[in-house]
Image (cartoon, coloured by chain):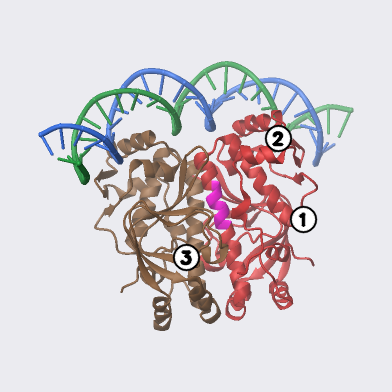
Chain colours: A red, B brown, C blue, D green
Amino acid sequence: MINPLVLKLEQRDRLSDDEKRVLESAISRIRVVEADEDIVHEGDRPSESSLLLDGFAARYKIFSNGRRQITAIHVAGDFVDLHSFLLKTMDHGVLALTPCRIAVVPHAAIEKITTEHPHLTRLLWLSTLVDGAIHREWLNAMGRLSATAHMAHFICELFLRLKAVGRTDGDTIQLPLTQAELGDTLGLSTVHVNRVLQELRKEGLIRWQGDALTILDRERLEKVGEFTPTYLNLHHEHR
Amino acid sequence: MINPLVLKLEQRDRLSDDEKRVLESAISRIRVVEADEDIVHEGDRPSESSLLLDGFAARYKIFSNGRRQITAIHVAGDFVDLHSFLLKTMDHGVLALTPCRIAVVPHAAIEKITTEHPHLTRLLWLSTLVDGAIHREWLNAMGRLSATAHMAHFICELFLRLKAVGRTDGDTIQLPLTQAELGDTLGLSTVHVNRVLQELRKEGLIRWQGDALTILDRERLEKVGEFTPTYLNLHHEHR
DNA sequence: TTCATCATATAACATATGTGAGTGCGGGCC
DNA sequence: GGCCCGCACTCACATATGTTATATGATGAA
């Protein structure tokens, strides 16, 4: 199996063959989750973490008034709940937005890595730090960008993240979210999501039909979304 | 020196005497930063991380139009930029909101910890994971709570975090932020921050004069802010 | 003292975004 | 083949929050 996590880690630092083998053998089994089912529930205390091999997933929380907020969108190569290894109790749920294929990694295996493979440990730690950097960027966008800019920013980010794991086709990505789900991730109403999409289309920045989203003018889209990709850390460093 | 980091870590797991000694000796020097000065600049590539011993600090980013967004408020016991150990390049600045006393920890010392002290490594990793959990909670609040609820939530959180390091006085904390700074952290205009504060005062939920903020009705304030403290992970687990 | 500065506070007005309702289309299912 | 049902899309209207401006009071400098 070509593990998309390895693909991603190798863009950030060198992985030894031994480390790759360790990662591979940390996987205890493969699991498939249907669309619209929880991968992990809020309140769970998982004894294993889920590495997404295929599909889209979302971290989310539901409020008293029924509203929902999505705090992360995950794609192939992402550990959707690596943090549960140390945080223990899930403070949010993780939902499969599409059918998902998942590699299951027991926490015991991760703990073993922390005692025997410091460099690999640092790379796993790094994955969660990039999650945090993305959270910060979303906070910036939510707090200080217009809805249109926020949407543009989100599209730019998702594009690069999918590209990092070889899931782009030219300027086109698969975006299997409904407008309601998009609203929950950007903190907008679905009506306004639609308005904003019309605007991006009218400006000739994107095309989106069915699942296929195409970036028509990357440069201008990045400008509208005030997007700079440094926070994604998609470059080699000694870590 | 009684290190407030140790104080905080010990609420989350047991620390051996050896581990405490290692942490203590990882500190290369103490540094003092004036209010309104940067502790680290955006774009820096620090070779050491800063552990806040006293004072308040903020992670922030400034946008093209001059707007600012604060993505974290830090208090005693917080590593303001532990993530720079692996992220390498700072994707935001860190500002001293008050005079700050800082323990400087070289990245080389942290790397050494990752090779020799797996359990301590996990606890440092945990610190950054809690940062991430707080980011997620802020995303939830920004995306789906009213400005008033968001403010209430923020106050509840800060109170508990200060309590964890023994910096509360009954129901009172020191809150040395201007309303403009509060606005930058909640993503609001300063005018609206003021409106919201008037409302919380009128409701008899808080008092705030000078630096001293008192929570007058904790239960109702938590309800208004839809606050539940699990994400702060201020309880013992084997990690 | 006097003056500048900065933070809080308030008012009037502007606008981005939310709400509630409704249309139409396409795909799955009996 | 017909019928739901979810989803995209739009409209009219409501409102939370932003903007600009001004007043007031503390604080510190000259």
Residue shown at 30% from the left, 64% from the top: B166
Q: How many residues crowd around disc 3 within 10 Å: few (fewer than 14), some, or many (20 or more)?
A: many
Protein chain holding label 2: A
Q: Nearer the viewer, mark 3 or mark 1?
A: 1
Nearest the eye: B45 or A189: B45
Residue A194 vertical position relative to residue C14 in the rendered view, above or below: below
Structural distance between the alpha carbons of marks 3 and 1: 32 Å
Question: Residue B60: x and y, percent?
Answer: 46, 50
Chain under disc 3: B
Q: Mark 3: which amino acid?
A: Ser
Image quarter (top left, top right, bottom left or bottom right) of the N terminus of chain A: bottom right
Measuring from the top left, give residue B156's x and y in whole percent.
36, 51
| Residue B28 in the figure: left or right of residue A210 | left
Report the number of discs: 3
Q: Which residue is mark 2?
A: A205
The numbered mark at residue A166 is: 1
Stretch in magenta? A131-138
Classify A228 as above or below B89. above
Distance from disc 2 to disc 3, alpha carbons, whole Å, reads: 40 Å
Q: Secondary structure at mark 1?
A: loop
- The amino acid type found where label 2 is placed reads Leu
Answer whether residue B67 is visible to the viewer in this image.
Answer: yes
